[in-house]
Image (tube, rainbow, N blue to C red):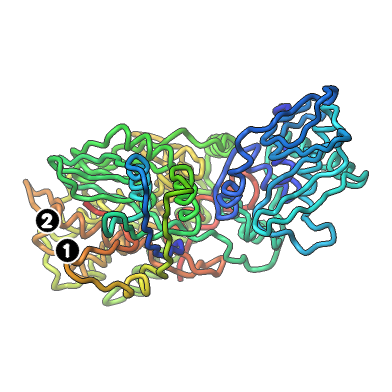
């Protein structure tokens, strides 16, 4: 049990009355997401956010007429609030006015409880400061209507009761459970972080199929820079890629979700700072596609998740490792079944058996053995999925522990490149959710590998990366001229690289039906959902991690 | 995909200093079509942010900014254009940028 900050902002009392979990995520874990309502709310506050008007003390001769943006706090109540507007009359009564977006709801009280409680908190603070205050006003900017809120005993008692509950919840270590099938969730800006319906379903708190509540995915996409010697700079609200002073690409920052640079490319300091401010990570790769590093702004504030991650990893993490490997083998099996030109049912049966063996494995070393056997089977049959007439440079593809650095054939070259991209995206996702990407459950945190990202990547290797390799070869998106062979090693040319990047990004935008939740979702989004489910499992909110397995 | 709408944003600014500020601001949200005419593909939140930024720059008594909604960037927002003379490029929609 930790100590909590002395003063609770009035807005947080509003959030708590709306949903205790929302309050916990926002205030205790300091997590935030904007949606239309929150941005619109700020727009409507523009007039009252600037301090103005005179605020004489209660015992002065002068009275408050109208004051804007007044900061009040009380150690006794343990509250702090910035009151949008205070209006006073000649008798010494004052009224706090709180600006809200939109229209007043059609309820007997004229406003929902959270808003009434919030303005009541402001009233209590004014009373505590010595003013006479029996009423507050909610000003609905959309309708330009004022709703009067009487600070009767019932509302004051309710407010004080909520404050007590709030402090008790803030002192606990884990977030309260999500609301069950609540109409409040769809409009909540944190719904994509909270995953109320998914969490309730997996923890058996609700039998209903999850509603599709994830907020619309951002339209922003990665910026990949592969041309050597260019400079990425910021100009106004844009990123500009310049070559010898000439602008070769200019992208709005609102269109960029991450920046990946390959090889000798400069990224300007101003650009990096702006990217950090917008929570856009920058990933660096070697020219050949080796994922070398990532930079982002300050680390996640979700300390509790990191703490649990360390605890579970310290206990061995076998349970999660089993689920991850089983999911990977099942996906490999499905992928072979769907794409092989001449299907070998014996191999499929073997893979199915290996998957269930993985589910019961007694140790990580035995799991490694099972995974290795499955990989050998799978990659032995991998060429059966390739178009036979596709001519590729280098040695013919053979699976012998998969060769790399340098890859000796074109298929291994493509596989290596796509795995790099996949691990990059899962590292970015793990960081965004609040994990330490280096501390895994199946992969050991050795040799500087982002072990957790590798864990998360397992279930997507065939679904995303292998699928892209198959596609670019079978559709002829890369051919012989897209590779260079040097001293037996096979590499991609600049053109080949771009073709693979385009195919990979296309794959991430591919929509599939979620096997557990039933709604349609892109792979890009699934990465995040899976990482959040793993987080929910570590935090004890859902009993088991569930991998993403297609049929 | 976040739902974006294409807007034509055109402005008349009476002061050179403010004009530069407005241009710089709108450049972050759209592509220049003509000197003071931009095409901006924006979600509701992005539009609100653009308006918030512009609000603090312009002189509301003499400057003027027009926002014209053109529909989806993939349908009406693309087909409603007809050009005479030099044909400018319309903003592309979605997808990664690969340089």
Secondary structure beneath dot 1 equals loop
* Residue A130 in the figure: left or right of residue A5: right
> Which class describes the residues within 10 Å of circle 1: few (<14), some (14-19), or many (20+)?
many
Q: Subunit of mark 1?
A: A
Disc 2 and disc 1: Cα gap in Å?
Answer: 8 Å
Which image quadrant for residue B6?
bottom left
Secondary structure beneath dot 2 equals strand
* Residue A246 in the figure: left or right of residue A40: left
Q: Which label belongs to residue A478?
A: 1
Does residue A267 sit above or below B32 in this rendering? above
- Tell me what residue is drawn at x 41 percent, y 41 percent: A451
Q: Which residue is mark 2?
A: A483
Most foreground residue, A370 or A443: A443
Where residue A101 sits in the image (x, y, percent)? 65, 53
Q: Subunit of mark 2?
A: A
Does residue A267 sit above or below A74 in this rendering? below
- Tell me what residue is drawn at x 15 percent, y 40 percent: A245
């Amino acid at each position: 049990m930790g100590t909590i900050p002395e003063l609770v902002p009035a807005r947080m009392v509003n959030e708590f009355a709306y949903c205790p979990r929302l309050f916990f995520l926002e205030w205790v874990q300091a997590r935030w997401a904007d949606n239309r309502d929150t941005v619109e709310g700020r727009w409507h506050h523009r007039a009252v956010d600037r301090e103005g008007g005179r605020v004489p003390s209660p015992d002065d001769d002068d009275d408050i007429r109208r004051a804007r943006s007044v900061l009040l706090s009380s150690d006794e109540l343990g509250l702090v609030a910035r009151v949008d507007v205070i209006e006073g009359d000649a008798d010494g009564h004052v009224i706090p006015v709180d600006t809200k977006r939109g229209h007043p709801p059609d309820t007997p009280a004229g406003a929902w409880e959270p808003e009434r409680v919030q303005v009541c908190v402001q009233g209590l603070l004014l009373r505590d400061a010595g003013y006479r205050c029996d009423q507050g006003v909610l000003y609905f900017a959309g309708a330009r209507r004022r709703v009067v809120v009487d600070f009767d005993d019932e509302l004051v008692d309710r407010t004080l009761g909520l404050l007590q509950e709030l402090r008790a919840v803030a002192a606990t270590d884990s977030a309260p459970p999500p609301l069950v099938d609540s109409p409040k969730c769809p409009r909540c800006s944190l719904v994509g972080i909270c995953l109320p319906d998914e969490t309730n379903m997996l923890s058996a708190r609700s039998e209903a199929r999850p509603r599709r509540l994830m907020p619309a995915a951002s339209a922003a996409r990665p910026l990949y820079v592969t041309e050597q010697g260019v400079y990425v700079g910021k100009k106004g609200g844009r990123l500009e890629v310049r070559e010898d002073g000439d602008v070769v690409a200019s992208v709005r920052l609102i269109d960029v979700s991450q920046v990946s640079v390959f090889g000798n490319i400069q990224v300007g300091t101003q650009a990096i700072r702006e990217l950090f401010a917008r929570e856009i990570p920058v990933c660096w790769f070697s020219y050949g596609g080796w994922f070398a590093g990532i930079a982002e702004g300050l680390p996640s504030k979700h300390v509790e998740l990191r703490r649990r991650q360390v605890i579970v990893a310290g206990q061995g993490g076998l349970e999660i490792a089993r689920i991850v490997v089983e999911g990977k083998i099942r996906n490999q099996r499905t992928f072979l079944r769907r794409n092989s030109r001449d299907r070998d049912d014996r191999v499929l049966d073997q893979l199915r058996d290996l998957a269930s063996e993985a589910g019961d494995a007694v140790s990580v070393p035995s799991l490694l053995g099972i995974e290795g056997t499955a990989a050998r089977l799978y990659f032995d049959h991998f060429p059966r999925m390739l178009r036979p007439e596709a001519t590729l440079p280098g040695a013919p593809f053979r699976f012998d522990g998969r060769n790399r650095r340098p890859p000796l054939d074109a298929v291994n070259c493509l596989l290596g490149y796509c795995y790099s991209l996949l691990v990059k995206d899962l590292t970015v996702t793990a960081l965004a959710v609040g994990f330490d990407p280096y501390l895994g459950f199946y992969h050991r945190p050795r040799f500087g590998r982002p072990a957790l990202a590798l864990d998360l990547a397992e279930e997507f290797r065939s679904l995303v990366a292998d699928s892209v390799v198959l596609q670019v070869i079978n559709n002829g998106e890369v051919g012989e001229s897209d590779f260079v062979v040097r001293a037996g090693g096979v590499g991609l040319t600049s053109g080949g690289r771009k073709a693979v990047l385009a195919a990979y990004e296309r794959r991430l935008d591919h929509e599939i039906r979620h096997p557990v939740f039933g709604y349609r979702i892109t792979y890009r989004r699934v990465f995040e959902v899976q990482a959040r489910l793993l987080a929910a499992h570590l935090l004890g909110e859902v009993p088991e991690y569930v991998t993403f397995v297609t049929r | 995909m976040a739902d974006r709408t294409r807007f034509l944003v055109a402005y008349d600014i009476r002061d050179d200093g403010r004009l530069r500020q407005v241009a710089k601001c709108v450049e972050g949200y759209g592509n220049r079509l003509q000197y003071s005419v931009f095409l901006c593909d924006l979600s509701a939140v992005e539009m609100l942010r653009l308006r918030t930024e512009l609000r603090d720059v312009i002189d509301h008594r003499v400057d003027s900014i027009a926002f014209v909604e053109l529909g989806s960037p993939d349908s009406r927002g693309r087909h409603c254009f007809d050009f005479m003379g030099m044909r400018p490029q319309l903003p592309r929609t979605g997808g990664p940028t690969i340089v």
